[in-house]
């Protein structure tokens, strides 16, 4: 008897129409395709146009997830949207997604944990489902980081992209599938290593992304390997049981180093950073949907999702898909 579990019924994703190559960026700033590929693995990113916002991308990803789940939008009773780039300071972009989907009544709110936002949103939704409060949840990660990049800072602007990913979670009794364990962490002593230099309560402006990349990199490998081990332990499993790691797509070198630390073969890591760059809270569900749709991730596979970002915040989830 497993009790109630939150099972992934369907996945979806959405990307802005405009795709930008490293070579295109190199025409505007002092960088090169060679530097970006070698240091990060990134080749392309999608950049939102004027009519594409966090909530429109989120709603497109949600529609695809709802269709894949084989349900109707009105069946959703909870929307948790992870984002650090909401359309407006308030209302929560989750309520805009609700309106775009035509859902008359449900619970809808945003979660702010930057790149780990999807893992935070997942644990929140899973807890609310297992508590019996909701039956079908949309968990979304969506970002338009291009709007908060300093396009003159080559150390950050080449790294990020825009996009959205979504899953439909449903309560199921005694399922073999579903979310088996989630583990989250935060350490606010590292606020100054990755942050935005503005906000409603300080400057009254939106601000731009600032990052001490090398230090973030160092913490990322240590923290991600630790939290993946911790979440597998909580599920009574080991790295040997894992079919796919679906990681936050910040840097191909972080993915390699983390897998190595856990003794996982690189072939078991879903890599989309080359195509999407770092899409913050969107990156894990975007990578998951990509791997589901191209046939890599199959029903019954054991997945470990993981992410780390500003705060620092970090986390991992063990999921039987
Ligand atoms: O999603 C949240 C988590 N974020 C991350 O996980 C990001 C973690 N950090 C990283 O991925 C890497 O640290 C970066 C990709 C950001 C940077 O790679 P790095 O190997 O740590 O390079 P660096 O920052 O130490 O810079 C090396 C050199 C510098 O030149 P000097 O001082 O050695 O002459 C930079 O000025 O590379 C230069 N540089 C660039 N050159 C060409 C920095 N950005 C660029 C660029 N193009 N875009």
Image: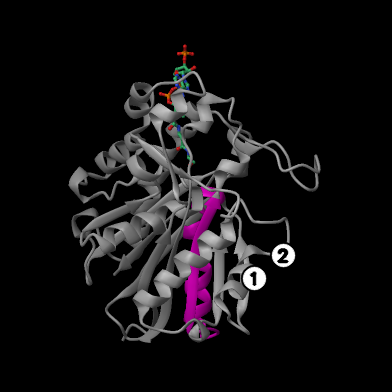
Residue closest to the far top: 30
Q: Which mark is residue 250?
A: none
**Residue 8 appears in the figure:** no
Question: Residue drawn at (58%, 69%), measured in percent from left and top?
Answer: 97
Q: Nearer the viewer, residue 191 or 199?
A: 199
Query: Which residue is at a point 58% across and 30% down the rendered structure image?
Result: 151
Q: Is residue 60 above or below residue 313?
A: below
Bounds of the magenta segment: 114-143
Q: Which residue is mark 1?
A: 95
Q: Quadrant of the N terminus?
A: bottom left
Residue 20 lies left or right of residue 74; in this view the side is: left
Q: Position of residue 200 (x, y in %)?
A: 78, 48
Residue 133 drawn in magenta: yes
Image coordinates for residue 241, horizontal then vertical, percent: 20, 60
Residue 99 lies within the magenta run: no
**Does the beta carbon at disc 1 come under 8 Å from ligand 1?**
no
Question: Where does the C terminus fall, quadrant-wise?
Answer: bottom left
Q: Which residue is mark 2?
A: 91
Residue 3 lies left or right of residue 110; in this view the side is left
- Look at 39% across and 66% down and name the residue there: 12
Q: Quadrant of residue 111?
A: bottom right
Residue 75 drawn at (x, y percent): 49, 86
Q: Are marks 1 and 2 in contact (CB under 8 Å)?
A: yes
Q: Is residue 281 left or right of residue 235?
A: right
Secondary structure under badge 1?
helix
Answer with the quadrant where ligand 1 appears in the image: top left
């Amino acid at each position: 008897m497993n009790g109630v579990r939150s099972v992934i019924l369907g996945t979806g994703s959405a990307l802005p129409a405009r795709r930008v190559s490293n070579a295109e960026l190199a025409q505007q700033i002092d960088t090169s395709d060679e530097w970006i590929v070698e240091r990060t693995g990134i080749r392309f990113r999608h950049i939102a146009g004027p009519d594409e916002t966090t909530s429109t991308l989120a709603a497109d990803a949600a529609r695809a997830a709802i269709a894949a789940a084989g349900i109707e939008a009105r069946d959703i009773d909870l929307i948790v949207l992870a984002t650090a780039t909401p359309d407006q300071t308030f209302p929560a972009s989750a309520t805009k997604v609700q309106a775009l989907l035509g859902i008359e009544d449900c619970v809808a709110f945003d979660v702010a944990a930057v790149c780990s936002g999807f893992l935070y949103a997942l644990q929140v939704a899973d807890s609310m489902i297992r508590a019996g409060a909701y039956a079908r949840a949309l968990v979304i990660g969506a970002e338009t980081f291009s709007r908060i990049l300093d396009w003159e800072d080559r150390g950050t602007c080449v790294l990020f992209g825009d996009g959205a990913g979504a899953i439909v979670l449903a309560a199921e009794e005694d399922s073999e599938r579903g979310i088996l364990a989630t583990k989250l962490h935060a350490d606010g002593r590292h606020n100054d290593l990755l942050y935005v230099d503005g906000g409603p309560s300080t400057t009254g402006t939106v601000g731009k992304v600032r990052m001490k990349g090398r230090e973030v990199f160092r913490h990322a490998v240590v923290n991600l390997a630790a939290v993946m081990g911790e979440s597998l332990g909580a599920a009574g499993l080991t790295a040997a049981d894992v079919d796919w790691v679906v990681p936050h797509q910040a840097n191909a070198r972080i993915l390699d180093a983390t897998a190595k630390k856990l003794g996982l073969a690189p072939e078991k890591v879903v890599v989309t950073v080359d195509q999407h760059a770092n899409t913050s809270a969107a990156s894990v569900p975007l990578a998951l949907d990509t791997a589901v749709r191209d046939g890599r991730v199959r029903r019954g596979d054991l997945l470990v999702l993981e992410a780390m970002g500003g705060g620092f915040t970090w986390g991992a989830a063990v999921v039987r898909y």
